[in-house]
Image: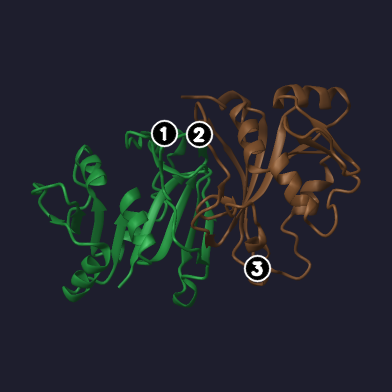
Chain colours: A green, B brown
């Protein structure tokens, strides 16, 4: 099993400001009544969300836990325990975690958070990437991508521009061409 | 006068490999007979191209000089002279250069090359950005964007997905919102 990525990013490639803040994403200028930019459709098939400690702690600051009814695994080697109902702690590496989740019946994993996404990409464990490009140059922040040991060819699946200027693209990583350089 | 950017970039934000090589852009899998991805349409209005020394030296390696008939300014403080017919050397800063070009009757400037684009963006001198997103995670290379002192809101103009998986978007930088943070 491989994992899916679904994330918003600035035109200059940042997923959050340096302190992890994502308030810029919720700028009123971007709101479209009744539009969730495909999130609920994406989430309908997801039966497990994997995130790192930074993302977990950011989500805990939200008014309500947004993943009720979904299994959540927090990957961390520093956390000792986890208090959020529905969330589990793991210190496994990405491939071991995915093997275990698959054995436990999980069908689709959603990987969230910059460093966690980077580690799954680096290990060749991402099969689908949906990026919603926000019309802003954030200038600085936490980058979506880090360096990889080799290039990965992607298969473009679809792109859609929303009325607020969001441009969303989905790519697949074809098994035959995930490493070419 | 402000400048326009028109550039291809990998999904992970690189415009070239670390040594400046752009052969990956010309992978046969991307070729579409008779399709130039809007380049000639973009160039039709351009009457001056501005690039840095690195890009200039890369272009000199091409089989033929691709900018015949267009004025080209190479921004460099290290070059002493320039041999290419049609190319001029300048050590001005971006805003001084644009003021001079405008006084000389130039209407539309195309800024090319990573560091040159970064300096024009940093000085708020870019009004239009067209990015053609190539379906590859290059893994490493020369980044399109560098840090900015402030965020810049963009106005999405249009996006188009080509049959080879290229996704091209154009944004404008509205004067009223070029600096918000």
C-alpha distance separating marks 3 and 1: 39 Å
Residue at 59% x, 29% y is B122
| Label disc, if present, on residue B147 of the rendered structure | 2
Residue where numbered disc 3 is placed: B27
B13 to the left or right of A88: right
Tag in front: 3 or 1 = 3
Picture coordinates of residue A69, whole percent (x, y): 17, 58
Tag in front: 2 or 1 = 2
Q: Nearer the viewer, residue B78 or A148?
A: B78
Q: SS at mark 1?
A: loop
Quadrant (top left, top right, bottom left, bottom right) of the N terminus of chain B: top right
Q: Are marks 3 and 1 on the same chain?
A: no
Q: Nearer the viewer, residue A34 or A176?
A: A176
Q: Chain of mark 1?
A: A
Residue at 85% x, 48% y is B67
Residue at 89% x, 48% y is B68
A143 to the left or right of B68: left
C-alpha distance separating marks 2 and 3: 30 Å
Question: In this rendering, does residue A113 appear at all?
Answer: no
Would you place residue A44 above or below residue A142 in this image?
Answer: below
Q: Chain of mark 3?
A: B
C-alpha distance separating marks 2 and 1: 21 Å
Residue at 55% x, 62% y is B135
| Label disc, if present, on residue A48 of the rendered structure | none
Picture coordinates of residue A143, whole percent (x, y): 42, 44
Q: Chain of mark 2?
A: B
Q: Earlier in the sequence, mark 2 or mark 3?
A: 3
Residue where numbered disc 1 is placed: A27
Circle 1 packing at 10 Å, graded few (<14), some (14-19), many (20+), is: few
Q: Are marks 2 and 3 on the same chain?
A: yes
Circle 2 packing at 10 Å, graded few (<14), some (14-19), many (20+), is: some
Picture coordinates of residue B93, whole percent (x, y): 71, 24
């Amino acid at each position: 099993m491989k994992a899916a990525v679904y994330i918003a990013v600035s035109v200059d490639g940042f997923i959050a400001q340096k302190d992890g803040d994502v308030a810029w994403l919720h700028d009123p200028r971007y709101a479209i009544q009744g539009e969730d930019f495909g999130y609920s459709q994406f989430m309908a098939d997801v039966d497990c969300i994997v995130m790192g400690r930074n993302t977990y702690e950011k989500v805990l600051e939200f008014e309500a836990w947004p993943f009720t009814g979904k299994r959540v695994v927090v990957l961390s080697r520093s956390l000792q325990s986890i208090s959020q109902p529905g969330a589990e702690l793991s210190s496994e590496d990405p491939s071991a975690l995915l093997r275990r989740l698959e054995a436990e019946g999980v069908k689709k994993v959603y990987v969230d958070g910059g460093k966690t996404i980077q580690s799954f990409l680096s290990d060749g464990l991402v099969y689908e990437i949906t990026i919603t490009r926000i019309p802003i140059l954030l200038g600085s922040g936490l980058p979506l991508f880090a360096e990889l040991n080799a290039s990965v060819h992607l298969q473009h699946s679809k792109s859609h521009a929303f009325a607020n200027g969001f441009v969303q693209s989905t790519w697949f990583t074809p098994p035959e061409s995930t490493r070419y350089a």
